[in-house]
Image: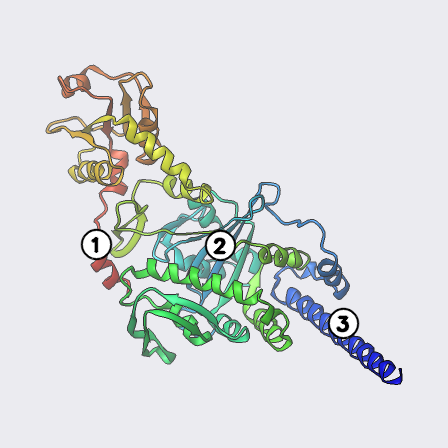
Amino acid sequence: MRTKNIFLKIILGLSLLIIFVGLVYGAFFIWKITNTENKINIKNENTVSFLDTFKNIVSPGKINLQGMDQGRINVLLLGIAGQGKPGRNLTDTIMIASFNTKTGQTALLSIPRDLFVEVPENNYTTKINTVYEYGLQTFPSDEENSMEPIKKVIENITSLDINYWVVMNFDGFQKAVDAIGGINITNEYDIFDPRYPGPNYSYETFELKKGFHHLDGATALKYARMRHNDPKSDFGRAKRQQQVMQAIKNKIFSTGTLLNPVAINQLLNTLGENVKTNIASSEFADFVALIKNLDTNNINNVVLDAWKKDSLLRGSQITGISALIPRVSNWSEIQELAQNIFDTNKIKRKREEIDKENATVVIINKSGNSIVSNRINKLLKENFGYKNVIALSTTGQKTERQTFVYDLTGGKKLFTLNELVEKLPAKASSSFNFSDKKSIGNITADLVLIIGEDLIPHYSLAEVDFKDYNEDSE
């Protein structure tokens, strides 16, 4: 009996000790999160107390974040080199993470650093990877306003509302991966880069064989940044960055990390020192709950790329530099992709309807520029997949300022008509004049495209092939 009582006391003592340790760790965990929240948030007026964080974690209520009412939360993720590094404020990584709050889906849209953009309202054009730095120079003492230029550019090219943004430097990334004990990835092909950027503007060799690897922070950073000798150039790098992000998310929310006080302490210290965000401290717990519950098997990864039939970008020479621009004359295709990123089948179904219409499109070039006509002819045939495109000889044609597309079917080829109107772009009309009717003669046309001078600035830009682009961007 006495032995039994001693045994029960030992069990009770151990139970109380476990509970005490759990409470201490829980209190430490909540205090650390509270401290980190207030460090990384740029809005000091929204600092939260230990009790606020405790309440949000222990008894979480309904998630209340910007974008919830619309069913979608968009977060702009920027990766920079940071202080003491070459190009310290150039954005090496530009990614939009979108969360469907109704279905639990996640989408990652990677935007290449060489995309040529205009900063709205500023009449300033540049490669997108310099826009964040431009904002810092324009608003040197205002962290919130300094993000407005890059935020406006992203919203302009995607038509998405950017609800939140996060900026992290390379040191923070490396230390965060080390804090959680590294990550697991599967490399799709052998990597050998003899010119990976090293310290003090030097180069070093980075090599990683094809297959499964456990990466520490330094290697994970190299894996995410490497682009020389990648067969897909920057687009391959963007895919690797998405892969690394998923691996980090899985590792952070694993039991081995969450129950490791040393790892949690190091991770939160790293975030506090190397991350800036407009996520309010009061929203932090909601974000943790949102990310924790994401379905990592239901992530749609999309990279904007060029030089493939279905690529939405193309390489071009602009003001003497190689850059990427939309293959059409506006951002309409990228906006359509961004809006439908959770269900890209909508775009495929529209493409199928256009194929069914099988419209005959006759091109009459009245721009006065043969390069423009040839480019649009190629775009319709090779990229859009139109089977019946007829480009007429336009020698001696009077030039027109505006591009028109005439519908001769009475609205029977609306999918094709709308594509030409939205993407080239062109103005739709049904009043086909006599001189143009005479130009097409006996040709049976469904749609007649009159190319005007308005398309010259975009479609006359010199093209850059994949090889030359890689050499120019090194």
Under mark 1, the amino acid is Asp
Kindly indicate whether the residue at mark 1 contacts the one at mark 3 (C-beta within 8 angstroms).
Answer: no
Q: Where is residue 367 in the image (x, y as percent from the top left)?
A: 21, 33
Q: Position of residue 281 (x, y in %)?
A: 66, 60
Give the number of the disc on residue 297: 2
Kindly report the distance in space between the C-alpha atoms of the residues bearing marks 3 and 1.
61 Å
Kindly indicate whether the residue at mark 2 contacts the one at mark 1 (C-beta within 8 angstroms).
Answer: no
- Residue 430, quarter of the rendered image: top left
Query: Mark 3 = which residue?
Result: 23
Q: Where is residue 241 in the image (x, y as percent from the top left)?
A: 42, 62
> Is residue 440 placed above or below 251 in the rendered structure?
above
Q: At 39% from the left edge and 66% from the top edge, which residue is drawn?
A: 186
Q: Where is residue 59 in the image (x, y as percent from the top left)?
A: 74, 57
Between circles 1 and 2, the one closer to the viewer is: 2
**303 vs 272, nearest the viewer:** 303
Task: Give the structural element (helix, strand or loop) at label 1.
Answer: loop
Between circles 3 and 1, the one closer to the viewer is: 3
Mark 3 vs 2, N-terminal side: 3
Q: At 52% from the left edge and 45% from the top edge, which residue is drawn?
A: 161
**244 vs 271, nearest the viewer:** 244
Mark 1 vs 2, N-terminal side: 2
In the image, 363: left or right of 61? Answer: left
Under mark 3, the amino acid is Leu
Give the number of the disc on residue 465: 1
Q: In which quarter of the image is the N terminus?
A: bottom right
Decide if residue 300 is in sight here: yes
Under mark 2, the amino acid is Asn
Q: At 29% from the left edge and 72% from the top edge, which residue is drawn?
A: 193
In the image, 142: left or right of 150? Answer: right
* Disc 2 residue crowd, few under 14, some 14–19, many 20+, Cα 10 Å: few
Kindly report the distance in space between the C-alpha atoms of the residues bearing marks 1 and 2.
35 Å
